[in-house]
């Protein structure tokens, strides 16, 4: 899928700019002797921490934690922010070890607190603070308290594995911080929920922006607006103009289901297509219950304001700016809203990013729409129906003299084909009987209908054409795991098993990616190619690559066994060893190596499966790769060779890191004769620019 489809795809470096604040700590923890002092009175300060605490390893706050705290202090005041941090630490320390608690002491100035980690009933260790290292900085105080806690744990249990991954205490801190922030009414003074954790349900929709006819004869058009990011107003105007050039648009369906946020300018620009300039669109209410009127101020003026009936479609995943559009138009009495109550993010929020997949949204103003007596946290539809029925229901209201408008998203073959209906209803035996009775095999299931049956991670990325091209019968059967249907199709006419989707993927890709082994085995027996490239991202959209990405080790074993060994050196096969190692997927790595795939694929940027395993301190994978003859040489990846990576991990401590270092040092050294190509040099240059931006500025590059 999209989140892994480029897996860092050894062929790209993606530079992502995130709006928000990232909180990250790195931790390394060598063992300490049991009698080692936790804190010495004559402590030498290094980077704001006593040197004696380095026995716990290095805890490094990235500068963004300061930005987070600055924001909280600015918006909530210092006492409230201090209280939030104190609650976070009080929750975090017992979570790390039940014998740890937080001791709160008076501050030096009397108006601040000092925090100390305490072990069981022992008094917390203390040390002098001089004028150069006051503890009035919240980031330093939290930092120091965590370092103390780590040192106490190491002193009493030197062999205890404190953290399980490289994020270490950062993940624990985030969890505790989010838990504290789950009481927005108490912390922020709002009655409605004003804090939301970003969920996996709020994912980008599979369809891109589109403007198209639903029923040209009746003048009914649909515009799908996935978000309000830059340029959507131009798409909107161009799309609408292209429709109006063909026929008059008499009714418009504005589809905001699963739509996200975007910029304030785009919000005003899109609303400017429906409402006159300077129209009051909502009142923004701050924490002090003070309101300010917000009027429409579109940065780009439309040719004319639309004065046709508009029907807005929403779902529980409609959020942010899309919610505001629905709320404003609904409040102005300009539209009817169909669907489900929205996500509840129709407010002014500040996004603070925590890690790769989590973020918090801090509300600083709630909105009150025209005609409403109180602030909104959700947009309630005028016609309440499930999101997948909203389009059909809205169209029904536009019927004329009993004639329903056409719905191109509902394929005609779904209406008339019992075979497609049986598959969508997951009635495998009924589908087989229909095939054996001679049902037409040249039918398709619509993406919308089939996707609803699949878990999110099983929905393939596809081109955003509208109306969308459907799934051939064999792919539909493979996607939902119907091997009997596939066999019935093969017995009738095996050519249908080789049909592809819009991106050139076969039924084998769908079956293997989902780990449907019986279906995978049968499709392989019918000659489907495990390394057939797709049209998009071909190197990592083969059935084999998709199965590796989803960690389907048993399916990978079936696929690799069906590939001629002379093709093991192709990038479609060889690169999968590196992918499996990078993902810490030992079973899949074992399946590939056992089949005879070389462990020595070198990605264009210079990384190998062995290097990834060493960097992750994955002892089992290092041993497995060495057993299968992985090359040990001096070639560099991001400025270090494998010996330097092993040494760096060894310095961080841990029994596995020590064993890995020994294995690498004692292994037979070879020469891979690896030469950097132009792509590799370009990637390294980009990486240096990311990691050391000041160097490139100083050299004028």
Image: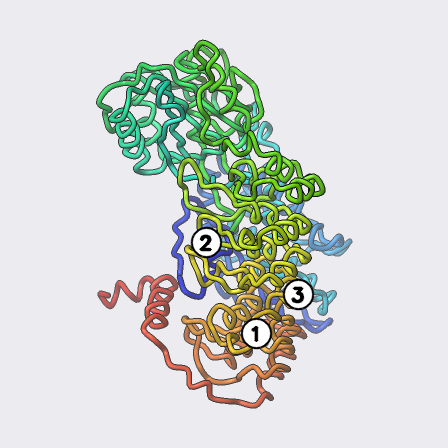
Q: Secondary structure at mark 3?
A: loop
Q: Is residue 19 above or below residue 580?
A: above
Please rate how many residues cluster around mark 1, counting C-alpha atoms within 10 Å: few if below 14, some from 14 to 19, many from 20: many
Q: Position of residue 418 (x, y in %)?
A: 62, 34
Residue visible at 60% across and 29% down? 186
Q: Nearer the viewer, residue 106 or 145?
A: 145
Which residue is identified by label 1? 614
Q: Is residue 105 at all visible to an observer of this figure?
A: no
Please rate how many residues cluster around mark 2, counting C-alpha atoms within 10 Å: few if below 14, some from 14 to 19, many from 20: some
On-image quarter of the C terminus: bottom left
Of labels 1 and 3, the one closer to you: 1
Which residue is identified by label 3? 38
Q: Secondary structure at mark 1?
A: helix
The Cα–Cα distance between marks 1 and 2, rounded to whole angstroms, is 37 Å
Q: Secondary structure at mark 2?
A: loop
Residue 213, quarter of picture: top left
* In the image: residue 58, left or right of residue 231: right
């Amino acid at each position: 899928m999209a989140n892994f489809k480029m897996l860092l795809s050894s062929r790209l470096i993606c530079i992502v700019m995130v709006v928000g604040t990232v909180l990250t700590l790195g931790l390394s923890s060598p063992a300490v002797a049991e009698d080692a002092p936790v804190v010495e009175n004559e402590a030498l300060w290094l980077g704001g921490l006593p040197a004696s605490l380095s026995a716990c390893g290095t805890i490094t706050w990235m500068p963004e934690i300061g930005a987070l705290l600055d924001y909280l202090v600015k918006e909530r005041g210092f006492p409230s922010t201090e209280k939030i941090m104190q609650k976070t630490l009080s929750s975090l320390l017992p979570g790390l070890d039940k014998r740890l608690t937080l001791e709160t002491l008076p501050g030096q100035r009397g108006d601040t607190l000092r925090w100390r980690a305490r072990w069981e009933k022992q008094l917390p260790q203390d040390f002098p603070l001089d004028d150069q290292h006051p503890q009035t900085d919240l980031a330093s105080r939290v930092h120091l308290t965590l370092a103390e806690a780590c040192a106490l744990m190491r002193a009493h249990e030197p062999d205890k594995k404190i953290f399980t991954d490289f994020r270490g205490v950062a993940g624990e801190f985030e969890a505790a911080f989010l838990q504290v922030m789950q009481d927005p009414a108490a912390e922020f003074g709002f009655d409605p929920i004003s804090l939301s954790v970003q969920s996996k349900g709020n994912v980008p929709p599979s369809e891109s922006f589109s403007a198209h006819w639903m029923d040209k004869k009746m003048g009914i058009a649909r515009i799908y607006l996935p978000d309000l990011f830059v340029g959507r107003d131009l798409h909107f105007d161009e799309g609408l103009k292209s429709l109006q050039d063909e026929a008059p648009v008499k009714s418009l369906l504005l589809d905001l289901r699963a739509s996200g946020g975007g910029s304030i300018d785009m919000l005003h620009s899109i609303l400017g297509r429906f409402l006159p300039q300077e129209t009051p669109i909502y009142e923004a209410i701050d924490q002090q219950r003070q309101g300010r009127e917000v009027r429409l101020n579109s940065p780009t003026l439309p040719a004319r304001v639309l004065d046709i009936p508009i029907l807005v479609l929403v779902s529980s995943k409609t959020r942010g700016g899309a919610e505001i559009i629905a709320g404003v138009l609904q409040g102005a009495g300009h539209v009817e809203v169909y669907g489900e109550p929205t996500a509840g993010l129709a407010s002014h929020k500040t996004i603070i990013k925590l890690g790769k997949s989590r973020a918090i949204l801090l509300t600083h103003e709630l909105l009150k729409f025209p005609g409403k007596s109180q602030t909104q946290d959700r947009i309630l539809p005028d016609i309440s129906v499930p999101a997948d029925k909203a389009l059909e229901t809205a169209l029904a209201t536009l019927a004329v003299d009993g004639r329903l408008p056409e719905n191109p998203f509902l394929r005609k073959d779904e209406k008339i084909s019992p075979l497609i209906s049986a598959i969508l209803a997951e009635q495998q035996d009924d589908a087989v009987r229909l095939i054996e009775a001679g049902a037409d095999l040249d039918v398709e299931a619509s993406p919308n209908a089939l996707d609803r049956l699949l878990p999110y991670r099983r929905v393939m990325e596809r081109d955003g054409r509208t109306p969308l091209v459907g799934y051939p019968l064999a792919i539909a059967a493979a996607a939902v795991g119907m091997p009997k249907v596939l066999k019935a199709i093969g017995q009738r006419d095996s050519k249908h098993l080789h049909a592809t989707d819009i991106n050139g993927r076969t039924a084998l890709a769908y079956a293997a990616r989902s780990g449907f082994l019986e279906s995978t085995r049968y499709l392989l027996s019918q000659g489907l190619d495990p390394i057939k490239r797709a049209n998009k991202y071909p190197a990592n959209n083969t059935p084999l690559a998709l199965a590796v990405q989803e960690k389907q080790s048993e399916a990978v074993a079936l696929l690799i066994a069906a590939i001629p060994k002379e093709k093991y050196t192709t990038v479609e096969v060889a690169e999968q060893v590196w992918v499996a190692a990078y993902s810490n997927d030992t079973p899949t790595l074992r399946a590939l190596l056992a089949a005879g795939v070389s462990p020595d694929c070198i990605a264009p940027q210079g990384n190998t499966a062995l290097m990834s395993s060493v960097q992750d301190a994955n002892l089992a994978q290092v041993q497995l790769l060495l057993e299968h003859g992985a090359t040990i040489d001096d070639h560099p990846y991001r400025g270090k060779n494998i010996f330097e990576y092993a040494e760096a991990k060894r310095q961080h401590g841990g029994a596995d890191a020590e064993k890995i270092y020994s294995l690498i040092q004692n292994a037979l050294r070879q020469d891979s004769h690896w030469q950097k190509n132009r792509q590799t040099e370009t990637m390294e240059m980009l990486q240096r620019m990311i990691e050391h931006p000041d160097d490139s500025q100083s050299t004028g590059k």
